[in-house]
Image (tube, rainbow, N blue to C red):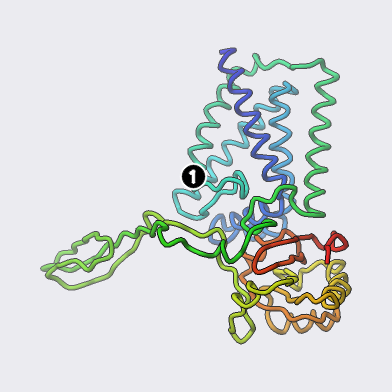
Amino acid sequence: MKVLVAISRIFVGVLFIISGLIKLNDPLGFSYKLQEYFSVEVLNMPYLEPYALIFSVLVVVFEVVLGVFLIIGYKPKFTVWSLLVMIVFFTFLTFYSAYFDKVKDCGCFGDALAMTPWESFSKDVVLLVFILILFFGVKHIKPVFTSLYTTILALLSFIFSFWLGYHVLMHLPVVDFRAYKIGNNILEGMSIPENAQKPIVEYAWKFNVNGEEKVITTDGSYPDVKGDFVSVDTKVIDEGYKPPVVDFSIESSEGEDFTQHYLSEENVIIVVAYNLESMEKAGAVKLRSMSDEALKKGYKVIGLTASAEDVKQRIKTKYRLNFEFYLCDEKALKTIVRSNPGVLELDKGTIKQKVHWNDLEDLKL
C-alpha cells in the first residue's frame, strides 16, 4: 500500500500541477469553456455565466495548489478529500458532456492538448482510481519537509498561482498554444492539404417497405430499396482533418469579403474587440493615439468585431476612432487574442506582434 500511495501521490500531484498551470496560463480561455458548460444547451445555468472568470481563476489555482499540497504532504486529509470531491465532480461533468455530446473539448489541458469528451472521461476515471488509492491510504502520506518548510511552500504555491493568474489577465498568456500565436500565418492555418483525411459520415436511411419500417446504413449513397422513403439521419463517425484556423473572416457590414485582401497586405494593424460594448474603456482610449502613429508610419489599420453596425458607429464616434471595423466570428476573435481590445501586426497574413491593450506601448511600429 505504501508503494501504491507513493506512485499515486507523484502521478496525481504532477498531473494536477501541469493541468492547472496550463489553464492558469490562460484563465480567460478556461472561462470561455466554463461559459459553454453553463449555457442553456449544456447545464442550463446561464445565471452563472457572468461569474465564469472568477470560477476559472479559483478552480485552476485550487488545482495547482492541491497538486503541490499532495507532493509536499501538506494537510493530507484535507488535500485528499478535496481531490476526491473535485475529481468526482469533473468525472460527472465529462461523462455528461460525452454521453449527451454537449461539449466537444473539455478544456482540461487548455489549448495545449485537445481531448474529446470520451478521452476526458477516461482520463478522469483513471485519476479517480489513483485518488481512491490515496483516500484509503492517506495515513501513508507524510510531509517531505519539516512543518515550517512545508507551510512556507504551501503558502508560496498560493501566492505564485494567484500572481500568475493576475499577470496573464493583465497582459497575455506567457505561452501561446493557439493557432494565432506570433510567427504563425493565418492563411496557411486556414488551408486544407490535398491529401487531408476526409470526414466520415454515416447515413441512416429510413424506408417504409410493405408497411414495415426499415433502416439501411450507407456511407452516403442512396440505397437500392423498393419502398417509400421516410427520412435520413446522419452521424459523423470521424471529422477528418480540421485546419487550425476556422471561422476567421474580414467582412464588411454589406457582406463583402476582404479576408484574402488584408491577409495578402504588408504592414497591417488589426484591432480585435469581440464585443465593443464590453470593451475595456481604458483600452479603447489608447486606440486613437496608437492608430494615428501607425497610419503616419504607413500601416493600414482596421478593426475586427462581432458587434452590430450601430454599435460600431457609436463606439467610433465616442472614442474618435479613425479606422473601420469589419465583422468576424466572436469565438474566433476570442481565440485570436485574450484581450478586449487587443492589437496584432500582420505581414502578408503572418502574425508579427500581438499585445494586450495594457501593453500597447510595447507595440513596435
Residue at x 51% of width, y 54% of height: 104
For mark 1, what is the residue?
95
Q: Quadrant of residue 89?
A: top right
The residue under the point 20% across, 67% down is 207
Q: Residue 190, image x and y in percent?
A: 54, 64
| Front one among 259 and 238 | 259
> Is 115 placed left or right of 258 in the picture?
left
* Residue ID at (84%, 63%): 360
Residue type pointed to by label 1: Phe
Q: Residues within 10 Å of mark 1 (few under 14, many from 20)?
A: some
Q: Is residue 286 above or below residue 198?
A: below
Q: Is residue 82 above or below residue 95?
A: above
Of residue 57 and residue 212, the one placed in the foreground of this image is 57
Residue that lies at the very extreme toward the bottom in this rendered image: 254
In the image, taking residue 190 as reference, residue 46 lies left or right, namely: right
Q: Position of residue 267 (x, y in %)?
A: 74, 71
Q: Position of residue 173 (x, y in %)?
A: 74, 51
> Quarter holding the N terminus?
top right
State the SS at label 1: helix
Quarter of the image with the C terminus is: bottom right
Above or below: residue 38 compared with residue 211: above
Q: Quadrant of residue 226?
A: bottom left
